[in-house]
Image: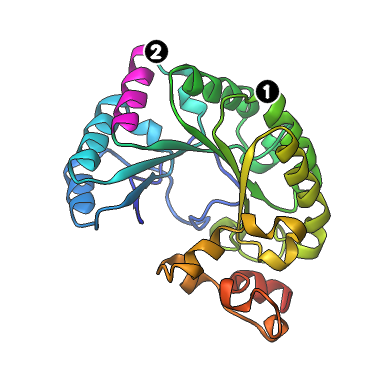
Amino acid sequence: MALIHLFRKCNQHCVFCSWPQEEGRGGDADMRGWLKEMASMPPGLVQISGGEPLLAGAYNLCLLLAAARKLGSKAELQTNALAAADMPAVDLVKIVRALNAAGGYFNVNFPASSPETDFKITRASGGFNKRLAGVRRLIKAGAEVRLTHVVNSLNYRALPAFAAFAAKKLKGAGWIQFSYIKGVGRAEGSRFLPKYGAVRPYLEKALAAAGKNNIHCEVDHIPPCFLGEFYRLNVDMAKMKGKVKGPHLQEKKHVPACRGCRFFKLCPGPRKDYIAVHKTL
């Protein structure tokens, strides 16, 4: 798995953005640089991110996705889907077809089930309705869509509501990843990082509700010991079983509280930035 950041230009100002507050938000298309970076990556999954990659435009994205396909890589296009709501239909279809040809999917950051919470998290006025419209357009155009719901202090109590919302309003989405917030960039510190134990009851209810509605889910950055009967949904367990090397081995570590846990060998431990804030599990 490899990650390419096209630029830092974005149409949101999310509280959980990995870019530090002081970093610039601009950026221009650099196709030559992007293609060179992609060519240096090993075959496999290429995550195309930003900023907001849809702001690169259909022409640039189609070229990039065609290159990924030629290199034998599968592409994941990470987006907030706002631009997909207003993009000309012909451009949207071109991107969807190019991504499908690369065996890929859209990874849509969908942070809330209400406009109020959406705005608190993204600072994008009208973003909730645009995001909903954008995702629906992507699904209608034939795209495979994954919803990423970043769990943080502003939305964790509404996790069951999000599962119900997705089942009712986002039919056709392939699956949901509930991903605990990374304490880096704008989210560094304790403000947006709730304790795993506080999140657990709401997350378990959300996962149960999603299961009843036949919605596939996975969980990232929350150790399996906090998932109850849903521990198998932890994405790191398969990686650890297969001895897969990746960011999970650098971002996480065991702490004294992990000793004796039945998941010790199947879990890399909690995030280091989580422990920096909460000191222990």
Q: Main secondary structure of the magenta part?
A: helix
| Whole-percent x, y for residue 54 in the image | 39, 32
Up-down relation of residue 139 to residue 159 (above or below): above
Q: CB of mark 1 within 8 Å of CB of mark 2?
A: no
Q: Which structural element holds mark 2?
A: helix
Q: Nearer the viewer, mark 1 or mark 2?
A: 1
How far is disc 1 from disc 2 in space, using C-alphas? Answer: 21 Å
Q: Amino acid at mark 1?
A: Lys
Percent coordinates x, y for residue 205 in the rendering: 81, 46
Q: Quadrant of the N terminus?
A: bottom left
> In this orientation, which residue lies closer to the viewer: 175 or 249?
175
> Which label sits on residue 136?
none
The residue depicted at 70 percent of the width and 61 percent of the height is 193
| Residue displayed at 50% across by 69% down | 240
Residue that mark 1 sits on = 169
Instruction: Tally the marks.
Output: 2
Give residue 28's position: percent from left, percent from top. Answer: 29, 39
Q: Which residues are magenta?
A: 90-101
Nearer-the-camera pick, 60 or 223: 223
Q: Residues within 10 Å of mark 2 (few under 14, many from 20)?
A: few
Q: Which mark is residue 89?
A: 2
Residue at 54% across / 34% down in the picture? 174
